[in-house]
Amino acid sequence: MYAVVGCNSCGNVWLLSDPDDADSAQCSRCGKRHRTRKLRHLYRSDDREAAREVRAAILAEKRGEKASFDRLDSVAEMERRLDAAGIDDDDYLAGAGLDPGEVAAAGDRAAGNGRGESRDRSEIVRDAVREGDRPDEETVVAYATEHGVPAEAARDLLERLVRRGEVSEHHGRYRLL
């Protein structure tokens, strides 16, 4: 279950996963803690994409851009188009005279991740949250630094993932949505 909720202090709107399971939630903008049952639930759905779409519509309306937003495709459709647009990494590297396999191997060696694939910093932070059992911030940062992400960058990435609704935070513990 997903809920679009709003902060009564700063007006921030975010996506809350499993709103009935958590006792409280923290606003990603102002940091205020809210009891989840008292939060204003602007929308509830089992479909994460539908909840994301409603949140985007609410934000557009708050900014006076409702007409512009209505002309756009869904958030999921725009993401799909972005993925399909342009040239993929392997074609780009090959066009520049580089072997994509060699570049991926060099990235693995530099990151020291030994997984046989190249991951960016946000993927490493997501993996840290995914592999831990509701890890705290220090556990996530420790995992990320072991895999080549500087500690401060890991903290910033974790905060961004929470703000974007990809990771939930409850009582200092994190969970991938």
Image: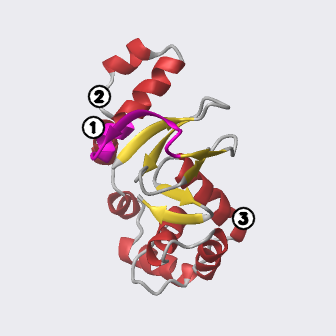
Q: How is the image coloured?
A: secondary structure
Q: Position of residue 12 (x, y in %)?
A: 59, 33
Q: Position of residue 165 (x, y in %)?
A: 47, 49
Task: Tell me the kind of residue under disc 3.
Answer: Glu
> For residue 68, which quarter of the picture?
top left
Q: Position of residue 94 (x, y in %)?
A: 36, 64
Q: Residue furthest front?
A: 37
Q: Is residue 55 magenta?
A: no
Which residue does the image show at 51% across and 73% down from the upper left?
128
Which region is colored magenta? 36-52
Q: Give the class, few, some or many, for how many residues have Cα within 10 Å of label 2's Cα (few <14, many ≥20).
A: few
Describe the element under mark 1 as helix, strand or loop. helix
Which residue does the image show at 62% across and 31% down from the upper left?
8
Q: Is residue 46 magenta?
A: yes
Q: CA distance from mark 2 to mark 1?
A: 6 Å
Describe the element under mark 3 as helix, strand or loop. helix
Indicate whether 160 appears above or below 111: above
Dot 2 corresponds to which residue? 73
Q: Are marks 2 and 1 in contact (CB under 8 Å)?
A: yes
Task: Tell me the kind of residue under disc 1.
Answer: Glu
Dot 3 corresponds to which residue? 152
Describe the element under mark 2 as helix, strand or loop. loop
Instruction: Tell which circle, 1 or 3, labels the residue nearer the N-terminal end.
Output: 1
Q: Is residue 28 left or right of residue 2?
A: right
Q: Give the class, few, some or many, for how many residues have Cα within 10 Å of label 3's Cα (few <14, many ≥20).
A: few
Which residue does the image show at 54% across and 64% down from the upper left?
174
Which circle marks residue 77 in the picture? 1
Task: Tell me the kind of residue under disc 2.
Answer: Asp
